[in-house]
Image (cartoon, rainbow, N blue to C red):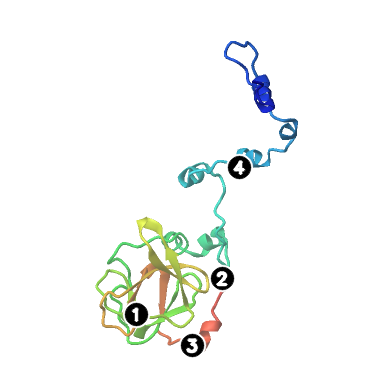
Amino acid sequence: MRPPSWLNAVARTTPSSSSSSYIPLRTSAPRSSLHRPQTHAAAVLAKPMPTPSFLGSLFSSKKSTTPKMTFPVQKSNDEWQAVLSKEQFRILRQKGTEPPGTGKYDTHAPSSGTYTCAGCSAPLYTASHKFASGCGWPAYFDSIPGAVERRVDRSMGATRTEIICANCGGHLGHVFKGEGYETPTDERHCVNSVSLNFSEKEVEMEERKSVDSKV
């Protein structure tokens, strides 16, 4: 009986177990794939490895880009040192702190008058703002409007609110809220005495705009 024609075709294309012939495996990519741009792989290889943040900050030489604050009264450190005492410069310009209980305005309790910035003479607080806190530094529950600015202070491992003179940027101290003092604002402006001067003259609010900046 003659086998069907399709069976003969299979026999011719299927190697027998005793045959030494074989079909070689393809060892190279098709020509079309060899010349195809490897865009995905190249993009992966070209992408830089991420650097851990702590290593980046450790080895980076980039300086801080925090913008420098500007104030109506501008002086260089040399100019400030020429008009301030060593202790005033340390506290007003270098953000130092006087020891508690040592400041001349700690227990100062006038019935009237104005506390001004020791650096630029700008009016900061009135006598009516002051109260006895027992903390060791002059305490005020409020300031003359627009006289004091606040800045976030993350030094010493804690977040506090620094207060500075709005006219020259001099460091005054820090402000604390919610301590339970019976004051209209429930705030305590904890100010270094060294940062202040006192005048018996009551300063009108309008005078805040005409601060003596000749020092």
Disc 2 versus disc 4: distance between alpha carbons?
44 Å
Which residue is at the front of the view, 151 or 148? 151
The reply to whether residue 28 is visible in this rendering is no
Q: Nearer the viewer, mark 2 or mark 4?
A: 4
Left or right of 134 in this view: 88: right
Q: Is residue 116 above or below residue 41?
A: below
Disc 2 versus disc 3: distance between alpha carbons?
19 Å
Residue 3's disc is none
Q: Position of residue 46 (x, y in %)?
A: 63, 40
* Structural crowding at the residue carrying mark 4, measured as other residues with C-alpha within 10 Å and reported as few (<14), some (14–19) or many (≥20): few
Does the CB distance between marks 3 and 4 fall below 8 Å? no
Does the CB distance between marks 1 and 2 fall below 8 Å? no
Determine the secondary structure under disc 3: helix
Residue 141's disc is 1
Labels 1 and 3: the sequence-earlier one: 1
- Quarter of the picture holding the C terminus: bottom right
Give the quarter of the image for residue 133.
bottom left
Which residue is at the front of the view, 133 or 60? 60
Labels 1 and 2: the sequence-earlier one: 2
Residue at image x 57%, y 64%? 75
Give the quarter of the image for residue 90.
bottom left
Labels 1 and 4: the sequence-earlier one: 4
Residue 71's disc is 2
- Quarter of the picture holding the N terminus: top right
Residue at image x 60%, y 15%? 16
Q: Position of residue 204 (x, y in %)?
A: 47, 89
Q: Position of residue 121 (x, y in %)?
A: 49, 75
Label 4 is placed on what type of residue?
Lys
Determine the secondary structure under disc 2: loop
Residue 47's disc is 4
